[in-house]
C-alpha cells in the first residue's frame, strides 16, 4: 500500500506522462480541430499536476490535505452523448492517421492512469480517497472523450459507444 506522499508523487508522474503525450499530439496534428482537442486535454492534465503539487506541498507542511473542487473542461460522458448530433456535423472525417495514432496512444495511457486512481480510491481513506475519486471521475471522462474522437475519425460505425449505422439492415 502506498503512502499518501508516494501516491501523489506517482499521480503526478501519470499526469505528466499524459500531458506530454497530448502536447506532442498538438505539435504533430495538422487538423485545427484535432489540435484544439489535444490542447484542451493537455491543459486539463497540467491543471491536475498543479493541483497535485499543491496537495503534496500541503502534506509536507501540514501533515494533511484538504480537498478543494477540481473542475474539468472535458464534458461528462452523458454531456458528450447529448452533444452527439452537433459533434457529428462539425467533425471532419478525412484521413488523419497521425491523430488516430496519437489518440490510440492517449487512450492507453488514460486507461492506465484511471486504473491507478481506481486503486488509490480502494486503498486510501478520508480526504485522500475523495481527492483520488474526483481524479478517477475526470480521467474516466477523458477516456470517454478520447474514445469518442477515435471511434468517429476511425469510421468504426460508433460514436461514444452508440452505433451510427447498421450494415445488417
Image (tube, rainbow, N blue to C red):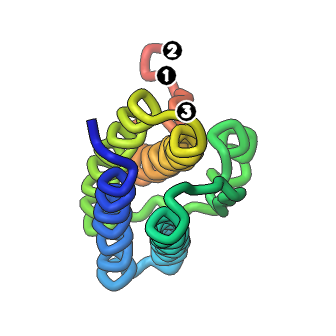
Residue corresponding to mark 1? 166
Q: Depth-wise, is mark 2 or mark 3 nearer the camera?
A: 3
**Labels 2, 1: front one:** 1
- Of mark 2 and mark 3, the one earlier in the sequence is 3
Q: Secondary structure at mark 2?
A: loop
Labels 2 & 1 near each other (Cβ < 8 A): yes
Name the residue that disc number 2 marks. Answer: 169
Using the image as rendered, state which of residue 60 and residue 148 is in the foreground: 60
Crowdedness near tag 2: few (<14), some (14–19) or many (≥20) residues, C-alpha within 10 Å: few
Q: Which residue is mark 3?
A: 164
The crowding category of the residue bearing disc 1, from other C-alpha atoms within 10 Å (few below 14, some 14 to 19, many at least 20), is few
Q: CA distance from mark 2 to mark 3?
A: 12 Å
Quarter placement of the N terminus: top left
Most foreground residue, 18 or 106: 18
Which quarter of the figure has residue 106?
A: bottom left
Residue 112 pos. (x, y %): 29, 44
Quarter of the rendering containing residue 87: bottom right
Residue at figure coordinates x 53%, y 27% from the top left = 163
**Residue 33 visible, this orientation:** no
Task: Give the Cα separation between the discs numbered 1 and 3.
Answer: 7 Å
Q: Is residue 105 left or right of residue 151?
A: left
One can see residue 136 in this view: yes
Which disc, if any, is residue 107?
Answer: none
Q: Secondary structure at mark 3?
A: loop
Q: Is residue 51 above or below residue 78?
A: below
- Point 45% across, 45% down: residue: 143
Q: Residues within 10 Å of mark 3 (few under 14, many from 20)?
A: few
Q: Is residue 40 left or right of residue 84?
A: left
Residue plotted at (27% across, 47% down): 108
Amino acid at each position: 500500500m502506498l503512502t499518501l506522499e508516494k501516491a501523489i508523487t506517482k499521480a503526478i508522474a501519470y499526469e505528466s506522462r499524459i500531458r506530454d503525450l497530448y502536447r506532442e499530439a498538438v505539435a504533430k496534428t495538422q487538423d485545427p480541430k484535432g489540435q484544439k482537442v489535444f490542447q484542451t486535454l493537455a491543459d486539463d492534465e497540467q491543471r491536475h499536476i498543479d493541483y497535485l503539487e499543491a496537495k503534496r506541498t500541503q502534506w509536507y507542511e501540514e501533515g494533511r490535505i484538504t480537498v478543494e473542487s477540481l473542475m474539468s473542461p472535458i464534458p461528462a460522458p452523458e454531456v458528450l452523448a447529448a452533444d452527439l448530433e452537433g459533434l457529428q456535423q462539425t467533425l471532419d472525417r478525412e484521413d488523419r492517421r497521425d491523430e488516430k495514432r496519437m489518440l490510440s496512444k492517449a487512450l492507453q495511457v488514460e486507461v492506465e492512469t484511471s486504473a491507478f486512481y481506481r486503486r488509490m480510491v480502494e486503498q486510501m481513506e478520508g480526504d485522500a480517497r475523495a481527492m483520488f475519486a474526483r481524479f478517477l471521475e475526470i480521467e474516466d471522462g477523458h477516456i470517454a472523450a478520447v474514445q469518442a474522437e477515435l471511434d468517429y475519425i476511425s469510421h468504426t460505425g460508433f460514436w461514444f459507444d452508440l452505433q451510427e449505422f447498421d450494415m445488417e439492415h
